Amino acid sequence: MDRGRPIGSQVRQNIIEILFLMKQAYGYEIYSVYRESFPRCTLRLIYYHLKKGTSIGEFKVHKVLREKGEYSWGESAEKTYYTLGENAKPKLNLKVKKILKNRSELLKKTD
């Protein structure tokens, strides 16, 4: 048996499930879907796992955009968009699929 911590993480696997259905998303967007699907998680934990997953090839940085707006910290925000990497192994979580479907239906109603 190998020594040390195993590479896999349930939180990272859940993020993979979210990105599999969303195709690409930035950190806070992933966090908001994660909280609806799998409670008891912090934004800091999501960003940690996005960084760790990027280093082991489960996620890729798709693009980095600087968006202007009026934020409490200044005039712009930098959003890093992630996609699945070559080492990601999605398993299609039906709970996440249902929540994303409900979100898209809500967005259509407000337009």
Image (cartoon, rainbow, N blue to C red):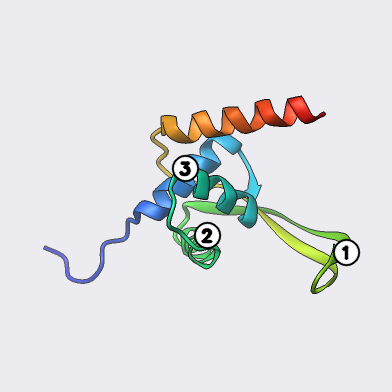
For the N terminus, give its image quadrant.
Answer: bottom left
62 or 110: nearer the viewer: 110
The numbered mark, 1 or 3, whose residue comes first in the sequence reads 3
For the C terminus, give its image quadrant.
Answer: top right
Residue 50 circle label: 2
The numbered mark, 3 or 2, whose residue comes first in the sequence reads 3
How far is the residue under mark 1 from the one under mark 3? 30 Å
Q: Residue at x 68, y 30 (%)?
A: 106
Horizontal and vertical percent position of residue 12: 42, 53
Horizontal and vertical percent position of residue 16: 47, 45
Horizontal side, residue 77 vs residue 14: left or right = right
10 Å crowding of disc 2: few (<14), some (14-19), many (20+): many
10 Å crowding of disc 3: few (<14), some (14-19), many (20+): some
Report the residue that reaches farthest toward the bottom: 73
Residue 4 circle label: none
10 Å crowding of disc 1: few (<14), some (14-19), many (20+): few
- Which residue is under mark 3? 37
> Mark 2 is on which residue type?
Leu
In this view, the mark in front (2 or 1) = 1
> Mark 3 is on which residue type?
Ser
Q: Which residue is drawn at 49% across and 63% down?
A: 55
> Mark 1 is on which residue type?
Glu
Q: Is residue 50 placed above or below 110 in the rendered structure?
A: below
Q: What element carries label 1?
A: strand
In this view, the mark in front (3 or 2) = 3
Horizontal and vertical percent position of residue 44: 53, 67
How far is the residue under mark 3 from the one under mark 2? 17 Å
Report the residue that reaches farthest toward the left: 1
- Which residue is under mark 1? 70
